[in-house]
Amino acid sequence: MLRADRGLTQRQLAEPAYTPAYISTLEAGRVRASDDALRHIAERLGVAFEELATGRPAHLVTDLRMRLTEAQRVLATGDAEAAVEQYTALLAEAEGNGFAEERAAALLGLGECGIDAGELDSARRHFELAEQVLAEVDAPLPARVPAMRGRAVSHYLAGELRYAVYLLESTLDELNRGGLHDPDALLLLYASVIGPYMDMGAHARAAQAAEYALALAPQAGDPALVARMHRSVARTLLAEGRVAEADASLAKAAELYRQLQIRTELANCHWMRGYVYAQNGDLERAEAELREAQTMLTAKRAALYTSQVAVELADVLHRRGKSEEAAALLHEVLSDLSPERGALHSAAAHRLLGIIAEDSRDTETAEEHYVRALSLLERAGAAGDLADLCRLLGDLLRRTGRVEAALDAYRTGLGHRTAPGTTTLGPAPAQPPL
């Protein structure tokens, strides 16, 4: 019993607000203490209110948070497999102790691991569960944004472009119109919507989202180093029994590790700038921006994003006369993708390989790549890309004397170009205060 361990009598514990008889009835389990009484007793015993209210030592949740930040560090620095093991164990522990916020954090981490590994169904389930847990504890919208954004990204990478844009834009509108201008939440959403915008042909919106994201980006010199310092401080404070101060240091470390993951998202912004430079014919600057994006997306992180940037970089390399390097990069991309995992990126790689083959007058190989790309795009429903590919295929067929087949390809392309609702978007999200 804590009272006996502290060497206190029932009278000493009760005074001045309560009576020894009241303490006796509490210890016998005949009545339930009010929150005010628990706070009084906790202060007299020198323990946290939560420890008495829940029956769990206060350091338990702090220790769990410390291990969550360690798993976050492992994921942020690229070792997704090790992070999965840690998050899985932490999820079980959080569930067993009834820690809702820590359970949501573990689910969110598992979702991010799924995104990195390309296991999109698993990622989506974890993000949905994290949203449910946070909704049950009435977490504010900015706190729920990482889970909502994760769900949208999992739909996007599975080829469900319009639904992904709907999820991201509606969340942006809810934040901006509701005055919830959390910069980190806005940054996550704007950085994540760039890819879907580009694939839908909404280039102006993509460029605008990229500029917003870069303007909102936190200015941290070396977040990994600072986060490591906060983790060390938290461990020292916890050993000294200073739980509240340890929690504060852990919160700072967790935020910095989240910023490391945001920096990975910002690779999309460099990719967008590279795309704009490429469209304006400034291929040298385009290549520099795209290589910067590729560097930010390390080999162990965000494989599907890396593939998207690699295809764009290959296009710039081809236009700069480096077709062999471009083709090698595209074949490397295709080895990491499948129709169920990165269909749009795979189609883009086949399309560009077809163009490179045409330039080399290898029409048979070019046609094979175009047909593969066509099949992948039809499955994903990317209407704008389908129309462009049908034009390329039709031109190839016409040049090789197959006029009827070329006409069929052109008609197919026109059908996709004019299909109602396939390329139009609703009003743009409200602008954030910058």
Image: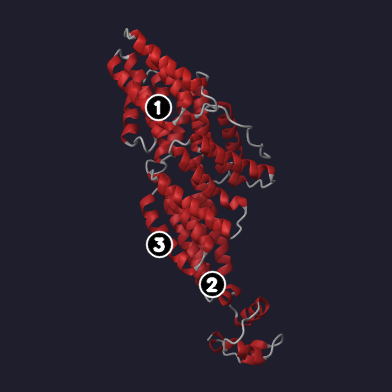
| Residue 186 visible here | yes
* Residue placed under numbered mark 2 in the picture: 58
Q: What residue lies at 44% left-to-right and 19% top-to-bottom?
A: 413
Where does residue 341 sit, x and y in percent of width and height?
37, 38
Judged left or right of residue 345, residue 250 is right
Label 3 with label 2: CB-CB less than 8 Å: no
Judged left or right of residue 320, residue 423 is right
Label 2 with label 1: CB-CB less than 8 Å: no
Q: Is residue 333 above or below residue 95?
A: above
User: Which amino acid, mark 1?
Assistant: Ala
Q: What residue lies at 50% left-to-right and 41% top-to-bottom?
A: 265
* Residue placed under numbered mark 1 in the picture: 348
Which of marks 2 and 3 precedes in the sequence? 2
**Farthest right residue?**
16
Label 1 with label 3: CB-CB less than 8 Å: no
Rendered image coloring scheme: secondary structure
Within-10-Å neighbours for mark 2: few <14, some 14–19, many 20+: some
* Residue placed under numbered mark 3 in the picture: 89
* Quadrant of the rendering where the C terminus is positioned: top right
User: Which amino acid, mark 2?
Assistant: Ala
Q: Is residue 201 above or below residue 15?
A: above
Judged left or right of residue 428, residue 228 is left
Where does residue 149 sit, x and y in percent of width and height?
53, 45
Q: Secondary structure at mark 1?
A: helix
Q: Nearer the viewer, residue 338 or 356?
A: 338
Q: CA distance from mark 3 to mark 2?
A: 20 Å
Which of marks 3 and 1 precedes in the sequence? 3
Q: What residue lies at 61% left-to-right and 32% top-to-bottom?
A: 426
